[in-house]
Image: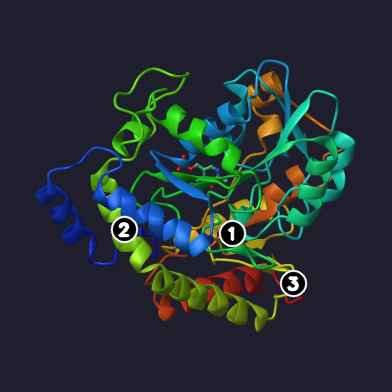
Amino acid sequence: MIPFNKPAVTGKEITFIREAMKANRLAGDGPFSLRCSQWLERTTGTRKALLTTSCTHALEMAAMLAGIGPGDEVIMPSYTFVSTANAFALRGARIVFVDIRPDTMNLDENLLEEAVTPRTKAIVPVHYAGVGCDMAVVMKVAERHGLIVIEDAAQGLLGYYRDRPLGTIGHLGCISFHETKNIHCGEGGALFVNDPRFIERAEIIREKGTNRSRFFRGEVDKYSWEDVGSSYLLSDINAAFLYAQLLAAEELLSDRMDSWRRYEEELRGMPCSKRLERLSVPEDCRHNAHIFFVKTRDLEERTRLIAHLKENGVYSTFHYVPLHSSVAGKAYGRFHGVDRHTTRESERLVRLPLYSGMKVGHIRRVVRLIRRFYLEKGISE
Ligand SMILES: *Cc1c(COP(=O)(O)O)cnc(C)c1O
């Protein structure tokens, strides 16, 4: 059996969790949280990395910080996880979905400008598979119209656009440490505050609307209720787990990258290789091997390929059902322009098994099964 995903484990997690327990300081912003935040700030250069309970919560914080309210419009791709839209719908925003680029599955930056209206407040680029959106264009459009850019970099940690780490380019960036991501702690996330004018309020929103962070730093002699907010701190037990993963980030990344490249090489050499489209990484992006996908001809072929792999003990899976086609997507959003690629490309995409420590033999087996599937169909092109 080859699973689709196996959450990474470095071996150090349990040591750090024991250490956290010994320190007897297990709530949020304990010693391990501090280490994780510092690691993230040092490694990515973000002004402030605030650990959160999830990327979903980081997105919710970002929506509050951006001052999103009823009637405001927020532009994003429809091909994304529900949280990207939900965080803004929760504040009463109207979601404006734009089409994606078929090569990266990221929002088509050339459609942004025409989707802007006087009600537009923010753009939320999603870096699918850890491949950067064209952030130069995104930032230019945002600047021209005075919009806030919130990167959904849930999958993007250690991916780069030009020389900039994903999540650090927009005003705010949201990272996920869910167990399905490259680096994880079961459930967890981070908000990258890149624009310093949001730092103080971000700390308050994250601490139940209080200035407790300032109190702990000794900047005020008591803390009080200052603003709206909620409880978004990651437990230090999770942070201890996460810190073990961050320390091993380079190894985890290079292992995934080896697997990713092996898939690419093996598939490229296959007789039906032209039939199966794969990710083409733009020149100014360095991805993080978060997802390896192939695209079949159509939905019907995809269904059969996934079934064929499963019959042979390999778990592959499709990905997002476009949000604009969902019940909530219709209630809270609208699709701007024509859906040329979103539905069609999402119906063709299959994600192949990819996880840290994946055996070379297993990758070869997956590729052999794909080859057999197309040979049986009599397809060699
Ligand atoms: C995983 C993911 C999220 C949500 O992350 P959680 O930490 O599970 O809340 C949001 N957006 C995208 C694009 C994701 O891949």
Disc 1: which residue: 130
Q: Is residue 97 visible in this depiction of the protein?
A: yes
Residue at 86% over, 27% down: 117
**Horizontal and vertical percent position of residue 192:** 52, 47
Residue at 35% over, 19% down: 224
Q: Quadrant of the C terminus?
A: bottom right
Q: Is residue 183 visible in this depiction of the protein?
A: no
Disc 2: which residue: 243
Residue placed farthest to the bottom in the image?
A: 269
Residue at 71% over, 72% down: 378
> Which type of secondary structure does the marked residue at label 2 adopt?
helix
> Which type of secondary structure does the marked residue at label 1 adopt?
helix
Foreground tag (1 vs 2): 2
Foreground tag (3 vs 2): 2
Disc 3: which residue: 283
Residue 247: image quadrant is bottom left
* Mark 3 beta carbon near ligand 1 (under 8 Å): no
Q: Is residue 320 above or below residue 282?
A: above
Residue 47 lies left or right of residue 164; in this view the side is left
